[in-house]
Image (tube, grey):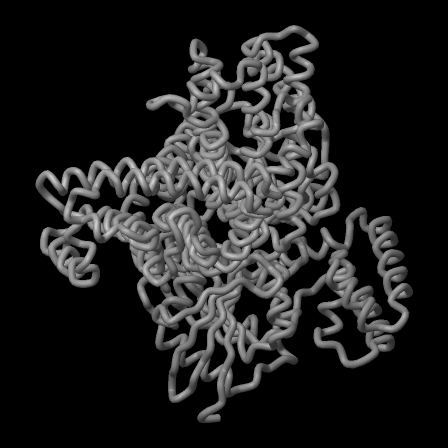
């Protein structure tokens, strides 16, 4: 046994302290990854003890081993498929009865178990003492007491793992839940399965029988693939269920849940002793305020505001510190790329710099994610997350969402200024698959910060006198529309998606550990960065070619080349009487100086906040590397001023030339042609081809909409703002046009980074394409309704705003009244009537 490798899995319910036990055992040596084919992350680590190497997998926290949530399926599939040497079941000693519910199911699954009775200190504070020996004798399992947050019981648990591995469990005497009146049916079904199995089952037949009576989808699939005559088995189960319900006025599923809780209650009475009467705990006193009808929502609003302020607002400020790092990375790569000519950059240079810019646009979010995930970890550890869900669950469930949808929607920008990427990532805390998918699909409808530039531009031009009203409209209309969309999605597209039993646990409040918070923040951020980068690179390459090809024809290039020659000739004529003229005789010399001068400025900007010593070293290195050019960068005197003045003029003229070339390239590109192709349809929404191109370019990043409009509406006079140029050049545009465009932008599909996160969190490109498609159709429909309908009714922009708002409110109200599928509880009310079972 000396060198045999052990594979141990950690299983437990949420808030059992499982993560602290994992950190305690591994000492932080861990790797985080998503489970194959799923969106839920698992942690793996390792530790050595008694000359044995033990690999440890931290499975997702789950209340049961059913098929409702991804966490439940992953935990169950891992134990079945990977067959770990040992499963350490982490239980909260202060809530033994509830945690036994999962233990019973692990035993039925045949998992080799060891109990880690955690948080015994919390139990003692609540006046409870768990007799670990009595619990061990009752379950016929080894039980080790621990306090993971304080490192207590670490060596004892490691010893217990080795001992449990070296000895065989007494399977004959393991605790089995007595299912009473259902036992005979379970025995009969097990015998039927034994006769019809094609090969020996990987799972115990008693467990499979129980799951079939619980109407478990995965169990039904196992029967279909591994047993003969699966239809006979299904018919038998259906017949027994109907017979049992008629005879006992209860479903087998509800009865199974009741008997488990009854068994847990008996064990609790036998093994838990009350050492003191604690009538009102500190948690109870806090909850009276935190969960009250009046103060609860106010406290929630304050916490959400603080979360938003620290992560989104504070995080965006910290992105300023990321800029020098990212620019430094770009500058380092740029040095090795070929320079090209005065008019054209080599393809490799343009492509690589474009991809790096796209990657940097995602990496700049790292400070936001680090703060956001740290704050979420604090809220999770403190125990506030379920309180947040409790306060808003009643409202959100009317629209097919979940109380835990609150955080993702806030981060996405319920009002103005969020970001859909962390919003989508935050949906992983939602256990209910239907509500989670609905939330993922509506988070991009929130007002992310990238939409604000277009809102600001249009409001400043067309709603200058009603700015406050227009901002209130756009800030609130999105959540009204999103709730309606969520309800429609859950009634149609997501109708058959599974819903989790709604088990809302209010754990005691805890003080989070700094190490635990930091580790989870770094883990989750790294997981995001690692997954997103490769996909961003692929998409950035695709967008580059769509906006640059087909390229401008040879004849037009010759025209631009002549303009380029004129600009260069003007420059060289202005400096011909200076000692620098000899260094700018060739096109190659001028282009090289342009590139090096830009490189010099970029690197100096990246060192803006650096020490004087660092800046001096940079100047020395740059002077050594570019000894022929460096004197020109800092040329003084009359000749130096002449050079600098002429160079600035040339640089500006070249920038305008390249802008014109890019503009013409965009017109003739695949994206430009698409904008013109769509014009016959989008004109009903008031969009011309220029607006179409701006919107299409925004698929990469919504900030591109205003940048593209800046290219399309060229500056005719110095100092003209984009607002002035657009107002002057689009004489036919009215406030109704602007309102339709604002509503379309409000419904605009996710940017590339968000689409990638939708793919990752929802578990496939199918959902990313749905998230891309339905907002386009919805946005175009609403924009057409506003523009064409408003024009037909003769409404002004402000009147159209009021009418649309009223229609959206009425629609949301009516949809909220429509009854959808109700999320079931683990024990239905009928089962609980007349039976002595404590609240979950």
Residue 186 position, x and y percent, is 79, 66
The image quarter containing residue 652 is top left
Observer-nearest of 839 and 412: 412
**Residue at x 80%, y 80% (from the top left corner):** 199
In the picture, measured across the screen, residue 217 lies left or right of residue 714, that is right
The image quarter containing residue 568 is top left
Observer-nearest of 407 and 481: 481
**Residue at x 50%, y 56% (from the top left corner):** 537
Give the vertical position of 577 relative to 20 (above or below). above
In the picture, measured across the screen, residue 270 lies left or right of residue 310, that is right
Give the vertical position of 269 relative to 436 (above or below). below
Give the vertical position of 217 relative to 1 (above or below). above
In the picture, measured across the screen, residue 27 lies left or right of residue 465, that is left
Residue 410 visible? The answer is no
**Residue at x 60%, y 71% (from the top left corner):** 79
In the picture, measured across the screen, residue 649 lies left or right of residue 432, that is left
Residue 457 visible? The answer is yes
Count of numbered tags: 0
Q: Please identify the residue farthest to the top as the structure is shown.
A: 794
Residue 297 position, x and y percent, is 45, 29
Q: Please identify the residue farthest to the bottom as the structure is shown.
A: 2
Residue 219 position, x and y percent, is 75, 64
Residue 112 position, x and y percent, is 57, 77
């Amino acid at each position: 046994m000396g060198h045999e490798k052990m594979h141990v899995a950690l299983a437990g319910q949420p808030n059992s302290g499982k993560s602290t036990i994992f950190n305690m055992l591994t000492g932080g040596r861990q790797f985080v990854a998503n489970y194959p084919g799923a969106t839920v992350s698992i942690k793996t680590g390792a530790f050595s003890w008694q000359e044995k190497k033990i690999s440890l997998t931290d499975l997702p926290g789950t209340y049961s081993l059913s098929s409702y949530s991804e966490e439940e399926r992953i935990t169950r599939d891992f134990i079945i498929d990977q067959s770990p040497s040992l499963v350490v079941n982490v239980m909260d000693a202060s809530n033994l009865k509830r945690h036994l519910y999962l233990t019973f199911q692990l035993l039925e699954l045949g998992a080799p178990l060891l109990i880690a009775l955690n948080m015994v200190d919390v139990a003692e504070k609540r006046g409870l003492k768990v007799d670990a020996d009595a619990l061990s004798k009752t379950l016929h399992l080894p039980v080790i007491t621990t306090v993971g947050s304080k490192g207590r019981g670490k060596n004892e648990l490691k010893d217990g793992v080795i001992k449990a591995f070296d000895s065989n469990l007494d399977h004959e005497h393991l605790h089995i839940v007595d299912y009473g009146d259902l036992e005979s049916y379970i025995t009969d079904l097990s015998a039927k399965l034994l006769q019809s199995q094609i090969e020996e089952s990987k799972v115990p037949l008693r467990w499979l029988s129980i799951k079939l009576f619980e109407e478990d989808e995965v169990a039904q699939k196992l029967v279909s693939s591994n047993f003969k005559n699966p239809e006979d088995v299904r018919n038998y189960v259906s017949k027994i269920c109907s017979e049992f319900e008629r005879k006992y006025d209860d479903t087998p599923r509800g009865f199974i849940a009741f008997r488990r809780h009854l068994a847990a209650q008996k064990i609790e009475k036998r093994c838990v002793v009350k050492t003191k009467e604690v009538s009102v705990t500190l948690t109870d006193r806090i909850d009276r305020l935190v969960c009250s009808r009046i103060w609860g929502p106010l406290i929630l609003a304050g916490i959400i505001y603080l979360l938003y302020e620290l992560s989104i607002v504070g995080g965006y400020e910290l992105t300023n510190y990321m800029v020098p790092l990212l620019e430094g990375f770009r500058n380092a790569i740029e040095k090795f790329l070929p320079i090209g000519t005065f008019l054209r950059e080599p393809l490799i240079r343009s492509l690589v710099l474009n991809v790096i810019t796209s990657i940097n646009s995602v990496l700049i979010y790292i400070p936001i994610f680090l703060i956001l995930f740290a704050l979420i970890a604090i809220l999770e550890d403190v125990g506030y997350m379920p309180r947040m869900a409790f306060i808003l669950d009643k409202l959100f469930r009317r629209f097919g969402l979940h109380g835990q949808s609150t955080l993702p929607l806030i981060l996405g920008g319920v009002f103005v200024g969020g970001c859909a990427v962390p919003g989508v990532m935050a949906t992983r805390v939602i256990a209910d698959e239907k509500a989670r998918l609905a939330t993922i699909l509506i988070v991009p409808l929130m007002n992310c910060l990238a939409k604000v530039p277009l809102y600001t531009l249009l409001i400043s031009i067309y709603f200058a006198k009603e700015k406050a009203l227009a901002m209130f409209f756009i800030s609130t209309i999105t959540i009204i529309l999103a709730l309606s969309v969520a309800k429609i999605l859950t009634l149609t597209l997501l109708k058959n998606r599974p819903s989790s039993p709604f088990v809302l646990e209010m754990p005691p409040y805890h003080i989070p550990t700094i190490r635990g918070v930091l580790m989870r923040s770094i883990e989750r951020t790294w997981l995001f960065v690692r997954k997103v980068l490769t996909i961003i690179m692929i998409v950035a390459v695709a967008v580059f070619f769509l906006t640059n090809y087909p390229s401008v024809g040879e004849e037009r290039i010759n025209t631009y080349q002549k303009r380029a020659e004129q600009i260069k000739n003007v420059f060289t004529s202005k400096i011909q009487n200076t000692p620098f003229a000899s260094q700018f005789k060739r096109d190659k010399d001028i282009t090289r100086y342009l590139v090096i001068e830009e490189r010099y400025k970029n690197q100096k900007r990246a060192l803006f906040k650096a020490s004087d010593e660092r800046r001096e070293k940079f100047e020395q290195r740059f002077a050594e590397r570019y000894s022929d050019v460096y004197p020109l960068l800092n040329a003084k005197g009359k000749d130096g001023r002449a050079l600098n003045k002429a160079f600035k003029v040339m640089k500006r003229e070249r920038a305008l030339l390249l802008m014109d070339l890019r503009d013409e390239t965009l017109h003739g590109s695949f994206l430009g042609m698409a904008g013109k192709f769509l014009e016959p349809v989008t004109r009903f929404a008031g969009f011309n081809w220029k607006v179409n191109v701006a919107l299409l370019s925004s698929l990469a990043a919504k900030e591109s909409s205003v940048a593209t409009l800046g290219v399309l509406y060229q500056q005719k006079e110095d100092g003209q703002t984009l607002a002035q140029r657009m107002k002057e050049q689009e004489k036919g545009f009215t406030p109704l046009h602007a309102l339709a465009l604002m509503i379309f932008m409000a419904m605009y599909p996710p940017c590339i980074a968000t689409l990638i996160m939708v793919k990752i969190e929802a578990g496939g490109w199918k959902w990313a394409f749905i998230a891309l498609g339905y907002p386009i159709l919805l946005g175009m429909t609403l924009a057409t309704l506003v523009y064409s309908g408003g024009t037909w009714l003769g409404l002004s922009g402000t009147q159209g705003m009021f009418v649309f708002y009223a229609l959206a409110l009425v629609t949301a109200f009516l949809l909220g009244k429509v009854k959808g599928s109700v999320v079931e509880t683990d024990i239905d009310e009928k089962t609980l009537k007349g039976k002595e079972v404590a609240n979950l």
